[in-house]
Amino acid sequence: MKKKILIIGFGVMGQAIADRISKDKKNFAVSVTDTKINQNSQIALKMGLLWESALTDNIQNYDVIFVAVKPQDMPGLALSVKSYLNENTLLISIAAGLPLKKLMVFFGHKKIVRLMPNLGLCVGQGIAAWKSSGFLNESEKKMLRKILLTFTESFEVNKESEIDAVTAISGSGPAYFFYLAQSLEKTAKNLGFKPHQARLLVEKTFLAAGLLQQNFPYKALIAKISSKKGTTEAALKILDKRGTGKIIRQAVLAAYKRAGELSNG
């Protein structure tokens, strides 16, 4: 029997999750909803998804609900739907900075999972970590893993604080990557390349690097490209001299600290 899944919040992540899960038509029936009805209902229709317009009346009919709204919108949403929730429904929040205890209070619900996916799921290369409230049985966890597998690789963490660490590494991680890419693109332009050439150089280099990294330690990969007294070694010496590794660690720790502040705030 198909599991009925509702995704509340149809932004970038909500759309990506809905698109991936809905491809498994044998096991899942996916509906979506959002406050931006005129705009997003049309997008949902084009994607072949069902639009849920009677949220409070029908919400008790869903086996799984993904809540993909902004953290500041969570209390209001919870207040409007909490009295209609089925106690057996699995509620999955992807909102950064909202701990399980708060979510349980907001929704007055026990079966809750906090999930931290990342932007990679939009291109079929997602990684996510999750932690449950402790009220899921093994059958429900098995169902959860099956659903997650449709759109991302994932793993369960032992402590909820690890979700904040995942946020700092893989949640924010793509931005660190784009920051480096942007710096390389600007440098290429300064060296005389046309904008489209600079962009192509960076894109192809990073796409290839992403594929090359599989199954090799990063130290070995760096060694493959670096030759003694060569160009790469000259560049890496500057990075080491300026403490780039330390700067990256400090940046990630700042993101981790902020994630913790949001969770405890």
Image (spheres, rainbow, N blue to C red):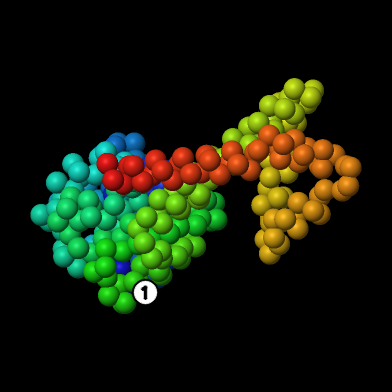
Left or right: 117, with 232 as reference point: left
Question: Which residue lies under the disc numbered 1?
Answer: 142
Under mark 1, the amino acid is Lys
Left or right: 180, with 173 as reference point: right
Looking at the image, which residue sits at the far right?
A: 229
Q: Is residue 186 above or below residue 177?
A: above
Question: Quarter of the image containing the N terminus?
Answer: bottom left
Residue 40 position within the rendered picture, expressed as x and y whole percent measured from the top left = 34, 40
Q: Is residue 201 above or below residue 92?
A: above
Left or right: 175, with 231 as reference point: left
Residue 20 seen in render: no
Q: Nearer the viewer, residue 247 or 8?
A: 247
Q: Which class describes the residues within 10 Å of circle 1: few (<14), some (14-19), or many (20+)?
A: few
Residue 199 position within the rendered picture, expressed as x and y whole percent measured from the top left = 69, 33
Residue 117 position within the rendered picture, expressed as x and y whole percent measured from the top left = 43, 53
What residue is shown at x 75% (from left), y 58% (from top)?
220
Residue 132 seen in render: yes
What residue is shown at x 76% (from left), y 51% (from top)?
222
Q: Nearer the viewer, residue 188 or 225?
A: 225
What residue is shown at x 51% (from left), y 55% (from top)?
126
Tell me which corner region of the image, top left, top right, bottom left or bottom right, holds residue 72.
top left
Q: Is residue 84 above or below residue 207?
A: below
